Image (cartoon, coloured by chain):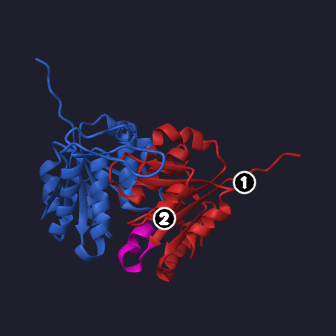
Chain colours: A blue, B red
Amino acid sequence: MRKIIIFMIIILRLNHRIERDKRLTTHVALTARAFLADKLYYSGQKDSGLELSVNKVNEKFGSNFTINYLENPVKFLQENKNKFIIVHLSVYGLNVNEEIKEIKKKENLIIIVGGEKVEPIYYKLSDYNISITSQPISEVSALAIFLHLLNNGKELKNSFKNAKLKIIGIERGKKVLSSK
Amino acid sequence: MRKIIIFMIIILRLNHRIERDKRLTTHVALTARAFLADKLYYSGQKDSGLELSVNKVNEKFGSNFTINYLENPVKFLQENKNKFIIVHLSVYGLNVNEEIKEIKKKENLIIIVGGEKVEPIYYKLSDYNISITSQPISEVSALAIFLHLLNNGKELKNSFKNAKLKIIGIERGKKVLSSK
């Protein structure tokens, strides 16, 4: 019998603050979804507005991406450390170019993206602390580049099967197909 | 005599609103800088806090990147249309995979990233309307991926010569070298 391998990519967004991070965390979530992650968990403040706006995009444009609040991210990581490889995206980490090949061999990943401040425990719990450019950038662009490299760019050709709306790229203007 | 070609990459961020976009525009600017763009112009509301925070990063971590306010972005594009190829990053545009090869042959680029709403004139003024994934993502991740593809990934190995602080990637923890 053939063994069925299920790959899973989970994003963990730390320390979400409703006022300050609302739009940034939305951008993290939309990037995670479009770049083919399966789930996003976020910690910090629970934010039903954030969840609603991400779920609305899912409903319209497809994918089985989910977003959920997590009260205790350290416990979550400790409980999943055996089943997942934990990657923490941090400006202080090792160059992604040198580590991505090895990370690609792993099956299930949890990718941590920080909020403003990341406690030392996350550096310790991670199997890889990885940096994109070693410059201050953005958790949004760091996540996009990491997933792009992990996917070998396949997100650029992807389309979600269960989409109600589909954007068709054109030279000028807008074209959106509706399945209903 | 050898002709010296100066390539220039300018990012134009439209419709900045101080309250709503402060952190997003900062992330756009930091991504532009780390991914080797030369300048960022932004329109909408002038925001000296934004400029200050980007200039501070420059001062500490190097690069000759500049950020400037632009009152009339349409006029700016019209005046520069002969000297620059204009690329507008939009979810409605053509797939980046199919267009990037041609765009790479051009020398000077203005890359437009939208705010919440982009007026039709920008679609018309652009030589290329380009989409990253045809899914709603983020101007931050769209810009990162576009510049990454344009640079052939060279930003991942880059270091800025005039940096006062230099982050050295390590497996765990933080290491920052200071030149002073």
- Left or right of B178 on screen, residue A46: left
Quick check: can you spot residue A137?
yes
User: How far across and down, in percent of the image, does residue B116 sit?
Assistant: 38, 66
The answer to which quarter of the image holds residue A101 is top left
User: How far across and down, in percent of the image, does residue B176 sit?
Assistant: 48, 64
What's the residue at 28%, 62% (across, down)?
Answer: A26
User: How far across and down, in percent of the image, does residue B27 sit?
Assistant: 43, 66
Q: CA distance from mark 1 to mark 2?
A: 22 Å
Q: What chain does mark 2 sit on?
A: B
Quick check: can you spot residue A132?
no
Kindly identify which residue carries mark 1.
B6
Residue B167's disc is: none
Chain-order first, disc 1 or disc 2: 1
Residue B30's disc is: 2
Bin the neighbour count of mark 1 within 10 Å (Cα to Cα): few under 14, some 14-19, many 20 and up. few
Q: Front-most of A156 and B112?
A: B112
- Left or right of B21 on screen, residue A160: left
Tell me the kind of residue under disc 1.
Ile
Residues indicated by labels 1 and 2 sit on the same polypeptide chain: yes
What's the residue at 30%, 58% (across, down)?
Answer: A28
B22 within the magenta span: yes
Q: Which residues are magenta?
A: B16-27
Q: Residue furthest top?
A: A1
Identify the element where label 2 is drawn: helix
